[in-house]
């Protein structure tokens, strides 16, 4: 039988690198893909360094490597969306939109068009078919699916509660989920690190990245100030007394307790 082909989003980090190694070990034909996205001119970007790390992993594991230019999709569907939502006084989640429109939107579509059977990423989540349960019937909590119901693909939390990313994938539909593999979803982060060392991966000791999807660890308010004009406002206490000021309500979210200046200390 022909081996199934999986295009893996190879970010340059340890999770996606281990995902490639596990998929190869399982017998898949694996192709590594680095996704090129939009970055503002004023932001110091390490994208090329990440791409080089992804290339090193692909070379070490002896798999084909591509770079997909998804700059326009990211700018429109993630960056512009985030700015637009903050301007409207709402708090967006750019990582959710990145997964929906970029990783499992444009990337998935292009990979399938190039002959992939599946795409995979290093997300800590799980996706599996209900066909694997009770002869094709999945018994959810509190009930039973009808016997003639079609199998569905379930999105489930990753094993590691401190790394679970299922929430950021909530927009994915059935037609997407059935084409996605999450190789590290059944592993704890510590196990992934051990596997990276076991496979001698060139990124085994690399630290995890933090921050907005693909933008990195940027100061969000400083980023937004390039697109939204700041408007100074008052900070009041529960008694309505003015105790400080802020740079503009659109830069904050409900419950936020930091990022503004307090001029009158409590006694």
Image (spheres, rainbow, N blue to C red):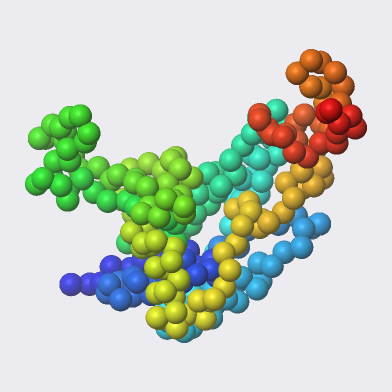
Q: Position of residue 126 (x, y in %)?
A: 34, 52
Residue at (86% x, 31% y) in the render: 265
Q: Quadrant of the N terminus?
A: bottom left
Q: Nearer the viewer, residue 237 or 144?
A: 237
Asked which quadrant contains residue 172, the reply is top left
Residue at (10% x, 35% y) in the render: 147
Q: Position of residue 181 (x, y in %)?
A: 35, 58
The residue furthest top is: 239
Q: Along the horizontal axis of the image, is 246 left or right of 139?
A: right
Residue at (75% x, 18% y) in the render: 238
Q: Nearer the viewer, residue 74 or 258?
A: 258
Q: Quadrant of the C terminus?
A: top right
The answer to whether residue 233 of the structure is visible from this angle is: no
Asked which quadrant contains residue 259, the reply is top right
Relative to 209, is 83 above or below?
above
Q: Position of residue 174 (x, y in %)?
A: 33, 43
Q: Along the horizontal axis of the image, is 52 left or right of 117?
A: right
The residue furthest right is: 263
Residue at (55% x, 44% y) in the render: 97
Relative to 93, is 191 above or below?
below
Q: Along the horizontal axis of the image, is 34 left or right of 223?
A: left
The residue furthest front is: 267
Q: Position of residue 114 (x, y in %)?
A: 41, 64
């Amino acid at each position: 039988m022909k081996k199934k082909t999986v295009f893996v989003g190879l970010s340059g980090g340890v999770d996606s690198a281990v995902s490639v190694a596990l998929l190869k070990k399982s017998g898949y034909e694996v192709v590594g893909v680095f996704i090129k996205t939009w970055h503002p001119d004023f932001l110091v970007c390490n994208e090329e360094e990440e791409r080089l790390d992804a290339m090193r992993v692909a070379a070490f594991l002896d798999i084909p490597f591509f770079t997909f230019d998804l700059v326009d999709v990211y700018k429109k569907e993630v960056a512009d969306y985030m700015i637009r939502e903050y301007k409207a006084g709402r708090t967006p989640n750019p990582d959710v939109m990145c997964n929906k429109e970029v990783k499992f939107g444009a990337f998935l579509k292009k990979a399938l068009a190039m002959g992939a059977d599946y795409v995979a990423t290093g997300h800590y989540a799980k996706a599996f078919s209900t066909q694997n349960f009770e002869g094709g019937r999945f018994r959810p909590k509190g009930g039973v699916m009808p016997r003639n119901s079609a199998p569905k693909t379930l999105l489930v939390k990753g094993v590691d509660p401190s790394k679970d990313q299922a929430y950021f994938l909530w927009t994915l539909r059935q037609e997407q989920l059935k084409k996605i593999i999450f190789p590290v979803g059944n592993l704890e982060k510590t196990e992934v690190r051990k596997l990276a060392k076991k496979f001698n991966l060139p990124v085994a000791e690399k630290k995890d990245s933090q921050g907005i999807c693909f933008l990195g660890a940027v100061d969000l308010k400083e980023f937004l100030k390039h697109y939204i004009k700041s408007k100074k406002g008052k900070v009041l206490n529960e008694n309505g007394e003015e105790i400080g000021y802020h740079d503009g309500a659109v830069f904050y979210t409900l419950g936020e307790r930091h990022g503004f200046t307090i001029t009158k200390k409590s006694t």
